[in-house]
Structures are given as C-alpha cells and as structure tokens.
Image: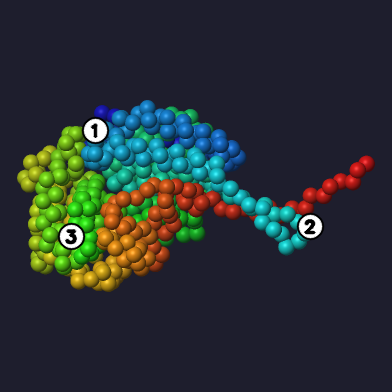
C-alpha cells in the first residue's frame, strides 16, 4: 500500500490531522494511506510560499519556462504510472480516458512555459513630453488552488501551471476522493527540483483545509474548480482576493430538425458518457426538435447499447467506468426517480450497483437514455453529473433558445444544424460562455478561454491557456523622466 505525505517548503511531512485511506471506486479496495492536513499545515504552507515568492518572482520567465519543461519530462517519464493511479483513484477507463488526461496535463505545463515568455508589457504615451511610461505585468504572490475529483490532474494544472509560470507561488488542495493520484502528481512536480516553497501540497477536507486556504490573509489569488454551492462559499471566504471560479453547468445539446442525426448521435454519447457523465461540460439536457425526436432517441439508445461498455476501468475494452463517489451516485438515483415519477420514460439503463451490473462496487451506473423529460424535472434543472441522456422535446429553435437561457447555469451549450448561419445566430444569443456548433458540449481546446457567462451561477474568470496567467498577474506602471542626451564635453 502506497503512503502519501504533505509537501511543504520542499519537504515531505506528516499531516496534522493524521491519516486516512483511499478506496478505489472500481474495486472497493483500499490502496493508499494518505496524510491529512489541518489548518496549521495550511498556515505553514502559505508562510513557506510567501517566503519563496520574492526570489521566484525575480527569475526570468525563460527560467520558469525551463522548470515547466523539467516537469513535463517527468510527467512523460511516469506517464503510465500517473495514468494507472488516475484510473485506480478516480475510476475513469485507463485506455479510453486516463492516458489522455495525463497527456493533457503535460500540455498545460507546455502552454504555461510558452505563455510566460510572452507575458508582455507596453510603453504607453505620457501626457507630458518630459516623461516616459512603462507598464508590465507582475505576479500576485501566493495563489491557492482547490481542485475537483472529476479531472484530478488537469483541473488543478490549468490553474497552478500558468500561475506558477507567471511568477506566483502555489498552495494546492486537491479533492479528498482523488488525493492519492494528486499526491503522485505532487511527487512528480517535486522531482523537477523547484526551489523550496514554490509549490506546496496540503490535502484535506474542503470545509477545513480548503476553507483555511482561500480565507488565509497571506493568499493573494484563489483558483477553484467545483460545484456551484462550494464555489459560492469560496467566493465569500476569498472576498477581496483575485478569483477564478470555474463552476457547474447544465449544458444543453440542441438538436434541430435539419441536424445530421448520425453526427448528433455520436456527439450525444461523448456528451453524456465521457468520464461517466461527471463533467461540468457534459450534455445535461438534450433539447430535440419534435420532427426528429423519435429517430434521435432510437439512434442514441441503439448506439448506447452497441458502443458503450461499462466495466472494470483497467480492462482495455471498457469505455465507461464507475461513478467516483456515493454522493454523486445518490444524485443520479434521485434525478432518475424524480423523472420517472413525473412521467419520463427510461429507454435503456437506469440502474446502478452490484446487483444491476454484476460489477465490483455500488458505484457502477448503467448508461441511461431518458425520454419525455420536462423543464420542471430536477434532471432538467440541476447538474446530474451522471451517465444519462435526458431528452426534452421542443417545437422550434426559438423554444430551444428560450429553455437554454432560462437556466441559471451559463457554462456550455451545443447546437446541431446543417444551416451554419442559423447555428451562429443561436450561438450568439445563447447565454453560455462556450458554444459548439455540430459538436459535443464536451469538445473543448485547452488553450482557449473557458468559463461561465456573466450573470450565471457557472463562475467567474476564465481558465485555458494564457487566461489564468492574465488573471494571476496585474499591471504595474512605472513613470520616469524622459532620457536626455548629454552634451558633448
């Protein structure tokens, strides 16, 4: 059994709150012993980071890019180990998903290193001919990152890689249910030989350790990815600090009457079943035009039965693994029960647990297609975070747009139509931070700005590429006398 410690000020140490054990969602077996931080550990980590910051901030961006390169090298060297740890801890299929997440993790550090070299300033004009002005971006200081369990590597790295490359120092609190694989990533980062205090790892329960971090007076910036409810608490506790909050979604996939149904069917499977539906970008509502609803449902049911294989995530043939934790699984049950009780029809799937699936734990949920969903049902209003295609019937694109914009969420949306002008018009009017045309809601490119639309509950700020780097730096202005040419002697 592996043992994982805290990492503070360049040293591995025991946690002030003792230890706990990691249990695999796919096997139900304990596989790692984890140190648990307390609030004193958080204070130690912030203090160490603050002490390390002046020297780290004064290094060249090219030097920090080289450190990112060292981390990438170690990620690549331990690629299989990282992928297997992710599968064991999170439950996502090794071949279909885990290796991809490790590769994307390396890409975040690659982008961060390159973007750090290009974090440029300017020489704006002064109101006076006798003065000159410099403006350039400087790091904030200590950045606290609290990351989720659905993408344990990349959702943390999309924040701390650009923040660190920009000259900030990091304290990272991962989600408790995927601490083991995140601890392995912390080991990989530590192996790169960063100066002590630049990167710190303090796992523990969010209400204790995460709260202490985001509220700590020594923290200048906070990055959080997670639920709407927790995000609201983080925003309040981190009041006055720079914040990036990437929160939940209830993203609609709109299938209009002229959609390519073969394309839409494949996209629906990706939208609903990637990471067992546990993605903020998942297709949480499928708004399907009445003219094609029956055929779309038939196609999705057939494709689900033919293409989606629920099973042991270490089996190369598995395309969907278990849900990560019981709270998520219970919400899946609650949403299906509510929908069924109010007239929705389960077309396939709908069950979970050992008795239904024959698999090792209660966390395996069948891929599910649900027809006859209405806007009033919980599954249409809330973020399910499970493997389900909830189909709502609409009579027009105007009705689909109205339902899209009626939601308090505003993270992602997708529309399927053969009319590009129509698709662009829909995208322009959809109240979402990201809209795909003829592609799954789960399609995104990691260098592009991603986040919730203003006024929605889906967050603030943007992750992706250089955008967190801009958030975790600020402009500094230097005003100085215009240089003069000295007269000849």
Instruction: Decide if residue 432 is in sight here.
Output: yes
Local crowd at mark 2 within 10 Å, few (<14), some, or many (≥20)? Answer: few
Q: Residues within 10 Å of mark 3 (few under 14, many from 20)?
A: many
State left or right for residue 330 relative to residue 184.
left
Judging by the rendered image, the residue that carries numbered circle 1 is 31
- Horizontal side of 164 relative to 134 (left or right) equals left
Q: Say above or below: 482 vs 198.
A: below
Residue at 48% from the left image edge and 48% from the top image edge: 466
The answer to which image quadrant residue 422 occupies is: bottom left
The quadrant of the rendering that contains the N terminus is top left
Where disc 2 sits, the SS reads loop
Q: Circle 3 sits on which residue?
A: 390
| Residue 404 occupies quadrant | bottom left
Q: Report the residue marked by disc 2.
A: 130
Label 2 or label 1, whichever comes before in sequence order: 1
In the rendered structure, the answer to whether residue 454 lies left or right of residue 282 reads: right
| Foreground residue among 335 and 136 | 136
Q: Residue at x 42, y 47 (%)?
A: 447
- Separation (CA) of disc 2 from disc 1: 68 Å
Label 1 element class: strand
Tell me if 425 is positioned left or right of 10 in this view. left
Q: Position of residue 91 (x, y in %)?
A: 23, 40
Instruction: For marks 2 and 3, give the CA distance.
Output: 66 Å
The disc, 2 or 3, on the residue closer to the chain's N-terminal end is 2
The answer to which of marks 1 and 3 sits earlier in the sequence is: 1
Neighbour tally class for label 1: few under 14, some 14-19, many 20 plus, Cα within 10 Å: some
**249 vs 6: above or below:** below
Disc number for residue 333: none
Which of the 4 quarters of the picture holds residue 234?
Answer: bottom left
């Amino acid at each position: 059994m592996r043992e994982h410690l805290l990492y503070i000020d360049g040293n591995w140490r025991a946690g002030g709150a003792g230890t706990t054990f990691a249990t695999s969602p796919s096997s139900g077996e304990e596989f790692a012993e984890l140190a648990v931080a307390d609030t004193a550990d958080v204070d130690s980590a912030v203090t160490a980071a603050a002490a390390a910051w002046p020297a780290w901030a004064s290094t060249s961006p090219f030097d920090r890019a080289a450190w990112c390169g060292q981390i990438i090298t170690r990620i690549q060297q331990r690629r299989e180990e990282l992928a297997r740890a992710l599968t064991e801890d999170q439950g996502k299929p090794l071949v279909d998903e885990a290796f991809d997440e490790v590769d994307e993790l390396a890409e975040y550090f690659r982008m961060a290193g390159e973007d750090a070299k290009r974090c440029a300033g300017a020489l704006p004009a002064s109101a006076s001919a006798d003065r000159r002005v410099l403006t350039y971006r400087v790091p904030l200081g200590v950045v606290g990152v609290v990351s989720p369990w659905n993408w344990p590597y990349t959702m943390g790295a999309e924040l701390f890689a650009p923040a660190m490359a920009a000259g900030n120092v990091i304290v990272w609190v991962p989600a408790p249910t995927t601490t083991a694989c995140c601890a392995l990533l912390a080991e990989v980062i530590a192996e790169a030989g960063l100066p002590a205090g630049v990167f710190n790892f303090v796992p523990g329960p969010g209400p204790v350790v995460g709260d202490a971090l985001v509220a700590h007076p020594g923290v200048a910036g906070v990055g959080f990815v997670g639920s709407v409810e927790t995000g609201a608490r983080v925003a309040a506790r981190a009041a006055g600090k720079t914040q990036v909050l990437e929160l939940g979604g209830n993203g609609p996939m709109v299938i209009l009457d002229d959609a390519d149904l073969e394309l839409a069917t494949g996209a629906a499977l990706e939208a609903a079943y990637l990471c067992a539906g546990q993605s903020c970008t998942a297709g949480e509502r499928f708004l399907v035009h009445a003219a094609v609803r029956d055929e779309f449902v038939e196609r999705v049911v057939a494709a689900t039965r033919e293409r989606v294989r629920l099973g042991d995530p270490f089996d190369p043939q598995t395309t969907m693994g278990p849900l990560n934790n019981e709270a998520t699984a219970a919400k899946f049950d609650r949403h299906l029960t509510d929908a069924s009780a109010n007239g929705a029809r389960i077309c396939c799937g709908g069950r979970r647990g050992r008795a239904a699936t024959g698999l090792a734990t209660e966390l395996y949920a069948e891929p599910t297609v649900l027809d006859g969903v209405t806007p009033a049902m919980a599954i249409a209003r809330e973020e399910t975070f499970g493997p389900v295609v909830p189909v709502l019937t609409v009579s027009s694109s105007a009705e689909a747009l109205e339902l899209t914009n009626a939601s308090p969420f505003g993270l992602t949306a997708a529309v399927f139509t053969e009319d590009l002008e129509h698709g662009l018009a829909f995208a322009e009017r959809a109240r979402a931070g990201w809209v795909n045309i003829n592609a799954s809601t789960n399609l995104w490119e990691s260098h592009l700005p991603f986040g919730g639309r203003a006024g929605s509950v889906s967050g603030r700020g943007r992750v992706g590429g250089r955008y967190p780097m801009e958030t975790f730096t600020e402009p500094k202005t230097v005003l100085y006398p215009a240089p003069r040419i000295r007269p000849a002697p």
